[in-house]
Image (cartoon, grey):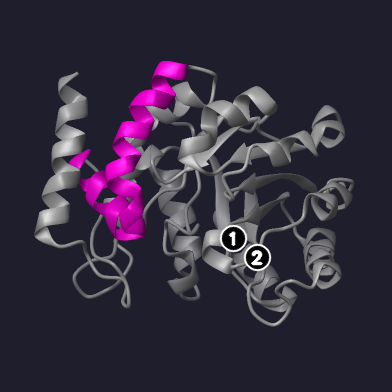
Amino acid sequence: MKDYPRAMVAIVTPFDTEGNVDGEAHVHNVRHLSAQGCTGFVPAGSTGEGPYLEKGERGALVAATRQGAEGSFILCGINAESVRQALAQIVEAADAGADAVLVLTPGTLVRGNHDRVAAFYTEIADAAPVPVLLYSNPNVTGYELPTDTINKLANHRNIHGIKDSGGNPDRIDDHATAIQNGFIVYAGASRALLESHKRGAYGAITASANYVFGLVAAASSGDPNGQAELDAVIAVVERHGIPGAKRAAAAAGIKSGTLRHPLTPVDDTIGQEIDTALVSLKQH
């Protein structure tokens, strides 16, 4: 098993003008980020419009990631409401070469039912051919995985860690014992990387790594100046969600492509504000 990188990018998915995954653009993006020192990629996550991906597209993204950076660590996003759906996506990702999978909490029929959500993860981890990481993103799902449920799941041999995008570093304190036993906690909220590091987070997986990977790597390793610079950029970008992230990524040299509807691009005024923020950063 490869080592998990400390800083990973929740990479955007480039779609062409017809709405199809643009594999060539994705390879370019992986190489672009690799040149900045990125060794870990999370295709098909929330930032990668994972809930909108169709059968076969996860595998295509994983394969293109491997083409762009052969020795990289690939943690493929899984967005499913049933165990059956999740395992189908996981097999697709694993067959294409994913090293592990990041499984988002189910957000519809069992949302808030902690026992059923735990069972969802346990069944998946029992059957998955690659390691599983939990993914709690309450801003997307409307449900935050409780820390006591996480700690119970951390005892499973095939559950290696979690990406927690809730933005509350205090929750990491609840995982102290699990962390000592090798459980990995990735911070997923850019504003909380430095504090999460102080509390014992292993590293970071963020959308902002698409456009300021160096700052994400710095902040998540304990650099207060990196966090301060990161804060200034995300203040302009993150309130515009995935469209904002794609515009910022494009300003930083990523081929972002189009968005899948109902998502739409930011308007020109917002786009220019984002472009200016990225240009100003480069000038410092």
Q: Residue at x 58, y 31 (%)?
A: 5
The residue at which mark 1 appears reads as 138
**Helix, strand or loop at disc 1?**
helix
Q: Residue at x 74, y 71 (%)?
A: 112
Residue nearer the viewer, 110 or 33: 110
Residue count near mark 2 (Cα–Cα under 10 Å), binned few <14, some 14–19, many ≥20: many
Vertical placement of 271 versus 141: above or below? above
Q: Which mark is residue 54?
A: none
Where does the image place residue 165, in percent across and percent down from the top left?
57, 49
Farthest bottom residue in view: 109
Sequence order check, earlier mark of 1 and 2: 1
Q: Would residue 248 be counted in the magenta stretch?
A: yes
Vertical placement of 281 versus 117: above or below? above
Label 1 sits on what residue type?
A: Pro
Q: Which residues are magenta?
A: 224-252
Label 1 close to label 2 by CB (< 8 Å): yes
**Magenta region's main secondary structure?**
helix
Where does the image place residue 208, in percent across and percent down from the top left?
38, 41
Residue nearer the viewer, 11 or 168: 168
Label 2 sits on what residue type?
A: Tyr
The C terminus: image quadrant: top left
Q: CA distance from mark 1 to mark 2?
A: 5 Å
The N terminus: image quadrant: top right
Where does the image place residue 139, in percent across and percent down from the top left?
53, 60
Where does the image place residue 185, in percent across and percent down from the top left?
68, 38
Q: Which mark is residue 143?
A: 2
